[in-house]
Amino acid sequence: MIDIQLLTTPLDTLGCISFVQSDDSGGIDVFIGTVRNATKGKPVLRLEFEAYEPMAIAEMRKIAEQAVEKFGAKRIALHHRTGILEIGEAAVVIAVSAPHRAAAFDACRYCIDTLKETVPIWKKEVFEDGEVWVAAHP
């Protein structure tokens, strides 16, 4: 089972974990990407995320399906925020369950690494003296 969401509201980490829990899985791995207060020593005020939603959701689903196929994951929740995020807020939550811990770890890492490379979500870092778009892809 796969749960893909692109949201403008705060992400529900516990809901993602609950979604992936299953009796046939002995391992759950969770990645939570949060907004940090600095980049390369420069204070960050906030982040702003934009996405090409239809393609982003389709690509996120494709990534999750590949993780199921490659690593034997049983359930995956892959949620990402868009809009304005403040320091400390979660920008992305990925939860994966698999029969064994190694597969859960591998699938979760695959999901976040591939998401950052291929999903059309763009991040703007806002500083006191300006702003910059970073991690623009694909």
Image (cartoon, rainbow, N blue to C red):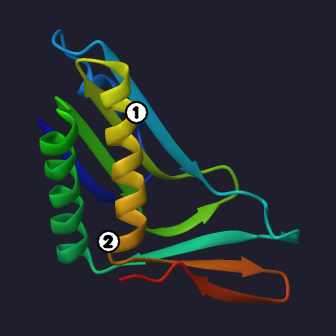
Residue 15 visible from this viewpoint: no
User: Label 2 vs label 1: CA separation?
Assistant: 20 Å
- Give the amino acid type for the residue marked by disc 1 in the picture: Phe
Disc number placed over residue 121 in the picture, else none: none
Please, which residue is most extreme toward the right here?
A: 41
- Looking at the picture, how far across and down is residue 135, in whole percent? 52, 78
- Looking at the picture, how far across and down is residue 103, in whole percent? 30, 30
Tell me the SS state at disc 1: helix
- Residue placed under numbered mark 1 in the picture: 105
| Camera-nearest label, 2 or 1 | 1
Say which quadrant the N terminus sits in.
top left
Direction from residue 82 to residue 3 in the image, left or right: left
Total marks shown come to 2
Tell me the SS state at disc 2: loop
Of the pair 30 and 4, the residue shown nearer to us: 30
Mark 2 touches mark 1? (CB < 8 Å): no
Residue 41 visible from this viewpoint: yes
Q: Residue at x 67, y 49 (%)?
A: 88
Q: Mark 2 Cα within 10 Å, few/some/many (few <14, many 20+)?
A: many
- Residue placed under numbered mark 2 in the picture: 119
Task: Tell me if residue 43 comes above or below residue 24 in the rendering.
Answer: below
Please, which residue is most extreme toward the top here?
A: 23
Of the pair 99 and 130, the residue shown nearer to us: 99
Q: Residue at x 32, y 71 (%)?
A: 119
- Looking at the picture, how far across and down is residue 34, in whole percent? 60, 51
Decide which of tag 2 and tag 1 comes sooner along the chain: 1
- Give the amino acid type for the residue marked by disc 2 in the picture: Val
Of the pair 64 and 47, the residue shown nearer to us: 64
